[in-house]
Every structure is written in structure tokens, then in C-alpha cells.
Amino acid sequence: MQHTGAMSTPATPSAGRAVISRVIVPLAAMVIAFGAGWTISAGQQKVDWTDATVSVQGTSVSVQTGQRTVRAAETVPAWVDTDGTWRDQTWPACLPDGFSGTLPVAVTSATVANKTVTVLVAVDCRAS
């Protein structure tokens, strides 16, 4: 067998492979992500407002609802201002240092790695 010295050119991807890598793979990833989100959200529960005894010391809040005490510090995940505006990840204006009273709150529990965690979800300042 003689070698002619000519080099072969690498084959270019076929049009079918290009379609798969540019369209079908991202589309499949989106479908999988949507399905995972749908499955996770289907297990979520609706959290209702409940009146709770709320006490504040500095930027730490203690919320007593029935037999549960929940605490948060520095920020509250969500809260409704006195004018009805929703605010996220800040400190509620209705919770000054030393506040003690009853406010509507949303509290929920979730089980993570066989441990139940109860968290403060929101505070409604419209009642203050």
C-alpha cells in the first residue's frame, strides 16, 4: 500500500446533527425543567394568614402561633406595607425595636432530609 501524502478532510457534522444540538437538546432540557418545576410545585401547599403574637428585639422577630415559635432576623421573606404594597427580603416598617402585639402572619413547615423546619413566610403590616 502506497501513501500518496494527501490528507483527508474531517467530515463536517451533518445537518441532522446540527438540528439535534441546536434545537432538540435545548428543547428537551426546557421540557425536563418544566416537568420538574411542575412536579415540585404540585407538592406545595397554600399558606393562609393567621393572627400571631409578635415580639421584636433589635432586628430579630419572634412569632408565636399556637404551639409554634418561629424566629427571623435581619430580613423577613415578604411583608405587606400599610398601603398594601408587597415588599421582599427587607425589614417590615411595622416591626420597630421593642414592638409587641398581634399581627397576621404566614408561617409554614417543610420536611427536609427528615427534619421538619417551620419558617416565617410573610407579615401583614396593614393591621398595625
Image (tube, rainbow, N blue to C red):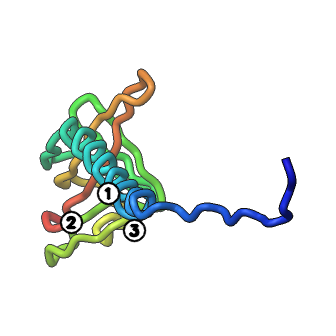
Residue kind at label 3, given as amino acid type: Thr
Residue kind at label 1, given as amino acid type: Leu
- At x 44%, y 57%, the residue is 17
The reply, left or right, for residue 47 in relation to residue 69 is left
- At x 24%, y 39%, the residue is 39
Q: Which of these two is toward me, 55 or 6?
A: 6
Residue kind at label 2, given as amino acid type: Cys
- At x 56%, y 65%, the residue is 12
**97 vs 115: above or below:** below
Instruction: Assess disc 1: are there few (<14), some (14-19) or many (≥20) residues with their C-alpha within 10 Å of its C-alpha.
Output: few
Local SS, label 2: helix
**116 vs 5: above or below:** above
Residue 125 bears which disc, if any?
Answer: 2
First of labels 1, 3 by sequence position: 1
Q: Which residue is mark 1?
A: 27
- In percent of width and height, residue 118 lies at 34, 36
Comparing marks 3 and 2, which lies closer to the viewer? 3
Position of the C terminus by quadrant: bottom left
Q: Which residue is mark 3?
A: 90
What separation in Å lies between label 1 and label 2 (alpha carbons)? 44 Å
- In percent of width and height, residue 81 lies at 22, 72
**15 vs 121: above or below:** below
- In percent of width and height, residue 58 lies at 48, 61
First of labels 3, 2 by sequence position: 3
What separation in Å lies between label 3 and label 2 (alpha carbons)? 13 Å
- In percent of width and height, residue 50 lies at 14, 45
Instruction: Assess disc 3: are there few (<14), some (14-19) or many (≥20) residues with their C-alpha within 10 Å of its C-alpha.
Output: few
Local SS, label 3: strand
Quarter of the view holding residue 4: bottom right
